[in-house]
Image: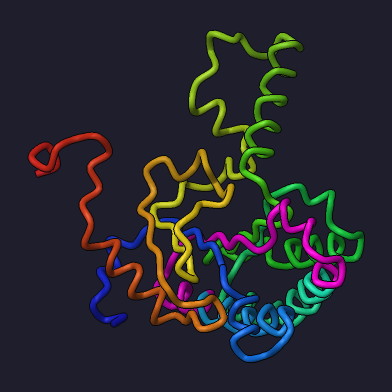
Amino acid sequence: MKDQIDLLKLPAHIAIIMDGNGRWAKTKGKLRVFGHHNGVLAVRDVVEGSCELGLKYLTLYAFSAENWNRPKLEVMALMELMVSTINKEISTFMNNNVRLNAIGDLSMLPARNHRELTKAMEKTAGNTGLVLTLALSYSSRNEMVHAVKNIAQKVKDGELNPDDITEQIFADNLYTRNMPDPELMIRTSGEHRISNYLLWQIAYTELYFTQKLWPDFRREDLFEAILDYQQRERRFGMTSEQLN
């Protein structure tokens, strides 16, 4: 399947909603955290597959702002898993030239998680390959409110004229300001929702939904999604004739 992919037409940025860990565990008679642990294996394989293709940006929805409302034990287990995973995967990041990044309200993370995440980002800062972004304590609506507040403050301070506010100015105040918008978004587990994820950035993103639960998702599934993407015509409001 990889050999069928046109490497000259790769999406510059792929965003993934990693859904189905809990349901996967339930089908095996296990606790939800068992699914989260196995979801890490899927992350590793997809990251390595992305590096294999030469993908530039991969953003994973790891923990939403709404996820803080889950049972306390599950949240604690997820936070512990995050720390252990980051520490284990540093060698994978370095071997694959991956730069780790994070977006979201990171101030909400427990101190230990924030510290380990920062250390990992600093350690991989010099890598020039795939930029792997983890969306943590992330809410797209909160992100946009944050951007509006930043812009309002600049107007108040006289740094910006309201008439000069453009789409680009707004985008430059989002967490993703240094990244291209996703060209492909993948959601696993058969759900067909965006779930408050990159709402501004996916205005022209191709959406791909798969029935596979996240712990079963592998690089071959990523390749299949990219092949599907490459068969689509991206018109951006124009006609097919205009593109040809």
Residue 132 located within the stretch drawn in magenta? no
Q: What are the residue bounds of the magenta stretch?
A: 47-76
* Front residue of this view, candidates 98 and 61: 61
Q: Residue at x 74, y 11 (%)?
A: 156
Q: Nearer the viewer, residue 105 or 116?
A: 105
Residue 87 in picture, x, y percent from top left: 78, 78
**Which quadrant of the structure image shows residue 40?**
bottom right
Horizontal relation, residue 151 to residue 59: left or right: right
Up the image or down, 86 lies above or below 177; here it is below
- Location of the N terminus (image quadrant): bottom left
- For the point 74% across and 18% down, which residue is it? 153
Residue 147 position in % (x across, y down): 66, 30
Residue at horizontal 71%, vertical 77%? 90
Colouring style = rainbow
* Residue drawn where x is 44% and y is 80% of the image: 219
Among all residues in the image, which is located at the extreme bottom?
28
Position above or below: 177 against 129:
above
Query: Extreme right residue here?
Result: 111
**Residue 70 in the figure: left or right of residue 57:** right
